[in-house]
Each structure stands twice: as structure tokens, then as C-alpha cells.
Image: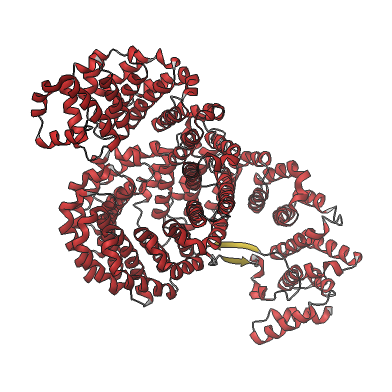
Amino acid sequence: MAQSLELLLIQFLMPDNDARRQAEDQIKRLAKDPQVVPSLIHHLRTAKTPNVRQLAAVLLRKKITGHWAKLSPQLRQLVKQSLIESITMEHSPPVRRASANVISIVAKYAVPAGEWSDLLPYLFQCSQSAQEEHREVALILFSSLTETIGNSFQPYFSDLQSLLLKCLQDETSNRVRVAALKAVGSFLEFTHDETDVIKFREFIPSILNVSRQCLASGDEDVAVLAFEIFDELIESPAPLLGDSVKAIVQFSLEVCSSPNLESNTRHQAIQIISWLAKYKSNSLKKYKLVTPILHVMCPLLAESTDRNEDDDLAPDRAAAEVIDTMALNLSKHVFPPVLEFASLSSQSLNGKFREASVTALGVISEGCLELMKNKLEPILHIVLGSLRDPEQMVRGAASFALGQFAEYLQPEIVSHYESVLPCILNAVEDVSDEVKEKSYYALAAFCENMGEEILPFLDPLMGKLLGALQSSPRKLQETCMSAIGSVASAAEQAFVPYAERVLELMKVFMVLTNDEDLLSRARATELVGILAMSVGRSRMEPILPPFIEAAISGFGLEFSELREYTHGFFSNIAEILDEGFAQYLPHVVPLAFTSCNLDDGSAVDIDDSDDDENVNGFGGVSSDDEAHDEPRVRNISIRTGVLDEKAAATQALGLFALHAKSSYAPYLEESLKILVEHSSYFHEDVRMQAIISLKYILIATQAAVQGHNEGMTKTKEVLDTVMKIYIKTMTEDDDKEVVAQACMAVADIMKDFGYMAVEPYITQLVEATIVLLREQSGCQLVESDSEADDDDTEHDEVLMDAVSDLLPAFAKVMGSHFAPIFSKLFEPLMKFSKASRPPQDRTMVVATLAEVAQHMGAPIGGYIDTVMSLVLKELASADATNRRNAAFCVGELCKNGGDAALKYYGDALRALYPLFGETEPDNAVRDNAAGAVARMIMVHPETIPLDQVLPVFLKVLPLKEDHEESMAVYSCIGNLVLSSNSQILSLVPELVNVFAQVAMSPVETPEVKAHVGRAFTHLISIYGHQMQPLLSNLSPAHANALAAIAPQS
């Protein structure tokens, strides 16, 4: 075989394609025989030309796996010996590398079997050889062996690290330093032990040196390896030393600021900054690196590029991503420098810098939303000014920024509608379609959160939108439809005069079938669903059938986004028709099932190639049916359209169940099965909808089985499935919003199904709640940076609000029996009340304490001394929400705290007093202060100086905003009147005035009015005709309303 094989190898390397093909076929045939191994070894060592030796090594690598077990011990020894000789004595670097690759494969089988015990000692010896080639090939082998026998290195890890560090600092050979850099990358990828990873920190200065040398010599692809290493270090749980972070940031900024480097190299550098912002934000803050980073990133937004605008490697786009990530993680450190950059650059003569100024503001609006809300005037001055810029790119960026503001700076941005809306209305008539499109997007986002303030603009808005809808390019029409949807949601019934015209136009869009029109059809389908919600069931139901028919037929067009919006459309229709939707279930539920069961379309590229196999394309000689090396996954991409479709379908199943109720019974079993699967789906959007929908399936199950003998058993089965998923999600899911939804669902189930339903799960629920309050759940352990300060740990407000709402939910269903559980939850909850915590944390604690006191009752007395000082201090907070919650809390603590609260009455009254004055700008705060005083009077009237308190108290009535306080306030007054309290009877004129306004109020409940009516009747019984002058001062409407609520004797 040896001679014929040599001729075939030579023939394979010929330029003649026919000759090559013949050789390849012959080689494939011969390669099935295990004897090909010694023949290839022979040619690897003896062939005259390096190309033939290299080809022999490559073929050997491909065939050795299938044949190794069939080789005799003598032949195996020959293979190992020959490979060692090849890497030691071979002069050609490509042949040495190809032989090293074969050693890596052989070692995979020989080392674990104890058949190659001298390999690692030999490599250590090689790595310290005086010959550069030996040192280099040893390092190359260390790299490749981590993939096949990485575990065998464990006992030598410390020695290996010392060796790698020494080779990184090799004074004589750049090739050795580069090979060492690659080996460090391989070992880091393989190593997951935190103590081992930490040891690599001392490599960072040497890695930076090697990378700088590579950049200087033009070896950018090698320098990029440094960024891959840093990537591994940043994502590892091991903390980076401060100096290391500074050095990495400095190097990354040098690279991304160098326009002469390749875009990929610069992009990798920018990406490292992004990872640091995401995973090590506390380090950036601690070492004051945020401002230096922004001083480089913000100007990068203005970098001109000739590349295609969709190029994700473009520095301006990558810089925008970094600034966005930093804003999300370090908002208060990011906002001042970005605002300064925007203010200065907005005045620049260079249009790119003016564009960058508004782009930067748009990009940070999600992360810095609270800070930006407080500076809206100067920010809007910059952006609205840029909407009038002579340069199209600046106007486009300004309209993008406005759209971002409209999305994230709610509700504050809406209060500027008088200046913002006219500017957007001008921008939608821009000469540039791009600016128009972004302006319609801004309009859609802005109107989405408007209410009746949109009404004066409704006519001009709809005039422009309807005009654009009929005469614009498709893309613009699609954005117009989004804007019309927002306007309809804001205008509600006022939109009815425009609805018919829009719906007629949508009929045209909803029957389009050309591929390029399907996105427009999707938007139209979505819009009809929104209009249905706005105009209501009575107007929509008679004209629904053609729209339903069009939506169902569109499902067969194989366009994921259309199917996604179709599910949303059906969800809206289910909501307006409620149980009337049952007629459509047989048509639409199977469509939702189809989308839920779709293959994700994960696209995986398998990389089975080696750099050194590209000699004359002989990588084509691939293995046949025999076993071959494990391929490496190079790239995984998911079809995101399918994800969105799945999420929409998952949501639809829940909403169908919720609204169709018992009619949904035939679909419950399959729906539950799908939702259970989707609750552990890899993408959080789908998990989120599954978590929400599971609760609705439970509600529908209860409705469907009511009156059946096995009904209770079936509901319990579904409840058990749902609760187990929620408890697991609370502690294990890595997405905060998904966990928040699970917490909210648990609270709702407690409220809807009562204590007995959740009693079997209380222990687990309490444990999960403690884990979340301690910020130790899966979704809270994102950053494990040793420099993180306990008091400065950032957490998600939405998540913690949902978690804290569980405590009142427990208290509501358990009453005073909640006390032993509350004692376990109290300490982790109070951590959020520290002075170093942000105001929203403290008010979360106060609101939780208030509701727990309200529902748990007397046991709250044991906590009064610990919490009262915090609550009284919060009454003076700069934030209205904090004052409001604190006022409510004071009332509940005094009402339920028993004697323990009595000693605080004087302090409480003094702290509440300012909230009754004109300096208090917020009506809801004042209403809650009145509620607090009312509760204090009801519990201990004898301790309250009523002669001083009642005139101030009555002066703020009737309640203006928070009518949940009505029962406490008016029953307090009623009780005082009915008991003929002398202090209250001295204020009859004030009482009659308040009573008349309560009687006229459209928002007060009959129960509240009954209290007031009884008190009024009592006043009549005491004073009789003396009341007449007071009553004659009332308007006829007020007098009649008051008479109507007085009990008839």
C-alpha cells in the first residue's frame, strides 16, 4: 500500500482537477483499511516534499479515530513515536502543526487508557528547550490537548500556569509568545474552577505586552486573542483586580480609538468595554473608568464610515451599544458626561457630531430614565432644535431620540406635549422618507401614553396619518399604522368617527399576499385588534367576520411576523367579546398550538476544518461512515421571528382561556402541556408569557369543572402543576421580569383561591421569598464582583416590588397566623430600608409594612419600636410616593399596633401636620395623611387633641384622589357625629359642606355615602330647623344629593 499511497498523495496535490478527483476516490477506498495508518506514518516521516508530509498528517488525523482500536500495541507505539519525532525534528512549521493535531486526537484515547504516560513530561521538556521550534510546538500541543484531554492536566495545573507565564515573557521569540497567548486562551476556556481562573489575573500585563507587539507588527488576528481571553476572565465568577481592569480598559480604548486598525479588531475592543459594563460595572465605577470610557465612546458615534449601514462592526454602532449597556448598569455615572457631550456637540459645525449628540441622548434614555426625567427641559431643547437641523442625518437621529424618549421617559414626557407634538407633526412632512419614518415611530410611541390631552390634536393628526397611509411607500405605511394604533388607544371613544375609514383601509391591507407586502398585512392585522379595543364590542362585533376570515387565511402564508400579529389580534378580540369568543375557538386555538409547537429553527454551523488543511483544498478528503472527530460548534443563531411568534401564541392561549372561560374546556389539557414546556423555554419572552398564561389556565379549569364531581380534584392537579413551576421560577429563573411575573401570579392565586389552596406550598413559597429578599436567586446573581458593595447592589425595582407584594398577600389570606412567617421575612425585608438604599427601596419597605399591618393586625405591635422612626422620617421624603406610603403606614401601625404605638402619637401628629398644609403639592399624599389621622382617632380618640386636629382635618376634605381612604375618613367622622362628640359638633357648617360634596361625588361608593347619610341625619335630629340656613347655602344639586343619601325615618 505504501508505494501506491505515495503516488496518490502526489497526484492529489496536482493542479489537474480530474487527476485530483481520481486520487481522492482511491484514497477514500484505501483509507477504509487500518493498514493505511502505518503507511501514512511512513509518508509523514519520509516523503521528500513538505506538502505530501502535511497531507499525510491531515489524512491521519481524519482516519486515526476510526482505526485506533484495531491497531496492535506495536503499531500504536510506532504511531506515537513517529508523531513525537515529527514535531521534534520536522523543519516545516505547517507539518509540525498538522502532526500536533494528530497527537491531540491520539492522546484523547491513549492518555486516559494509560498508554501514553510520557506525553505530558515530554511536552514540559520540549517547552523549555533552547530551540524556538520545540517551545512553540509544545505550546501548540498544550492548546489543542485541552480540547481532548483537558482533565489530565489537572494535577499539573500550577506548573502549567508558571510555564505559560514564562513563555508569554519569552525574550527571544515572538512565535513562542504568540503560541503562549493562544494556549492561555485555550486553558481559560477549559478552566471553570474559580481559584484556577484567579491565577490568570497575573498574566494580564504580559498578555497586553504580547498584544501590543502583535498590533505593532500588523498581526491583528493574534492581538484579537487577547480580547477573547479578557472576555473569558470578565464572564468568569472570579473577581478582577482593580489594576487589571484599568489596564484592560486603557488597552481597549487605545485599540478602538485607532481608525487604521481593522473594524473587527476595533469591534472586539469595544465589546470588551461592553462586557465590563455588563458584568463588572462596580469595578468601572470604583476605579473611575466610566468618564474616560465615555470620552472615547461618545466621539466614536460621530465617526464617518463608508461601510454599509447594516454593518454591525461599524464603530459608531458598536459604541452606541456600549453607551446603552453602561447607561443600564451605571446610570448616574453615565448621564452627566453624556449630557455634557450632547450639549457641546449639538453646537458643533460638524454635522456628524450634531447627529452624535442626539443619538447619545436617545441611546441612554432607557438606562438613565429617572435622571433624564428631571432634566427634560434642556434635553428637549437640544432634540427639538435638532429636528430643524439642515442635515437630514441630524433630523433622523433627533426623531429616533424622540421616539426613545416617548418610550422610556413616561409619563413625564407627555406633559410636554404642547411643545413636542407640533414638532413631530412638522417632522412627519420631512423631505426625507427616513426622517418621516422615524418621526412616525416617535409619534406612535408618544401617543401611546397620552389620554384626553390628545383630543385637540386628533383632527390634524388623523389628517396626516390617513393621507400618509394612502400615498406612502410600504415601510412608511407600516409605521403610520403603528401611530394610528397609538392615537386610537389614547383617544378611545373620541376615535370612533375615524374608525370606519381606517377599518375600510385595513380591509385592503389584510388581503395582500405578495411577500413584500406581508409586513404591512401584519401591521394592519395588529391595528384592527387595537381599534376593536378602542371602539368596543357593540360597534365591532357586527363587522368582525371578514376581518377574522382574513386573519385566519393569512396564517397560511408562512410569514412569522404575520402569524405573531394574528395571535395578538385574536387575543384582543377575545378580550372584547369575552365568552362570545367561544364561536371562534375551534378555528383559532389550533393555529396557536401550531405556532407553540414550531421548531425554533436553530441554525448551527459545524466547523470541521483546520487552518492547516487548506493546502490545495485537501480538506475535501473527509471521513466516510466511520467514527470521526467531534465537530466544534462555530455559530448558533436562532430565528428570532419564530421566538416572537411563539411568545404571542403562548400569550394567546392564556387570554383565550381567561375570556372564553368554561368554553375553553376542550383545549385545557393540550394548552397546559404546552405552557409547562414553555415555562422552562430557553428564551425569557416565551417563559414570561407561559408564566402569565398558566394562571389563566388555572382560572379556566376552575370555571370548566364547576359543578362536576371530579372538579375539585382536577383544579387541585392543575394548581399543583402551576405552583411547582412558579416556586421553581422564583429561585432558579435567570430573568428578573419572568421571576416578577411568577411572584405576581402567586399573589393573585392567593387572593383568588384563598389560603387553603396554597397551604401545601407555604413553606416553599416562604423560602423562595427569603431567597429573593436576600437577592440570592438565580436572576439576582448576575454580577459576582468582589468589589461590589452590599449597600450599592443594584436590583430591579419591578422585581422587588413584586417580591414585596407577596408579604401582604400572605398576610391577607393568613391574618394574624402570618406572624411566625413574618418574623422570618422581617430582617431580609428591612435590609432595603437602610439610608444608603435608594428612595424607591425605602418606600417599598414602608408600603409592605403598611399592608402587612393592615392584614396581620395585632402582631405588628411587636415591630413598632423598630420601624416607627423609619416611617416617620419617610413622611418628610422629597418623593411624593414615599410620603404617601409613609402616611398610610403611620395610620395602619397606629390602628393595629396597640399600646406599643400609643407613645408615638404625638410624634406622628407633628410629622403628619405639614402634609395638610399648602406646601404639600400632592393630593394623594394629603388624602393618606387624612386617612392616618382618621385611624388614630378611631383607635384612641382620647389621646388626640381633637380641638386642634379636627379643623385642620376637615379643611382638606373631601378627598381628592385616593378614594381607598374614604371608608376610614368618613366612618371616623360618622362615628364622632353619632357619638355626639362636642368637638366635631362645633364644626357643623364645615361638616355639611363636606357631606354635600361626598353625596355628589361620582367616585364614592354607596357604603361610604351611607356612613355620611347616617351622620347627616343625626345632625338633623340634634339641630332640626337650625340646619336650614346651612342647607339653603348649598346648590339645589348638592342639597338634593344630600337628601337622597339620608336614611328615611
531 relative to 871, above or below: below
Q: Nearer the viewer, residue 171 or 961?
A: 961
Specify the quadrant of the image occupied by residue 3. Answer: bottom right
The image quadrant where one finds the C terminus is: top left
Left or right for 580, reference 662: left
**Residue 203 drawn at (x, y percent):** 63, 41
Left or right for 201, reference 251: right
**Residue 432 drawn at (x, y percent):** 23, 63
910 relative to 242, above or below: above
Specify the quadrant of the image occupied by residue 481. Answer: bottom left
One can see residue 862 in this view: yes
Specify the quadrant of the image occupied by residue 531. Answer: bottom left
838 relative to 362, above or below: above
**Residue 244 drawn at (x, y percent):** 55, 38
Residue sitting at x 43%, y 31%: 851
Q: Nearer the viewer, residue 558 or 914?
A: 914
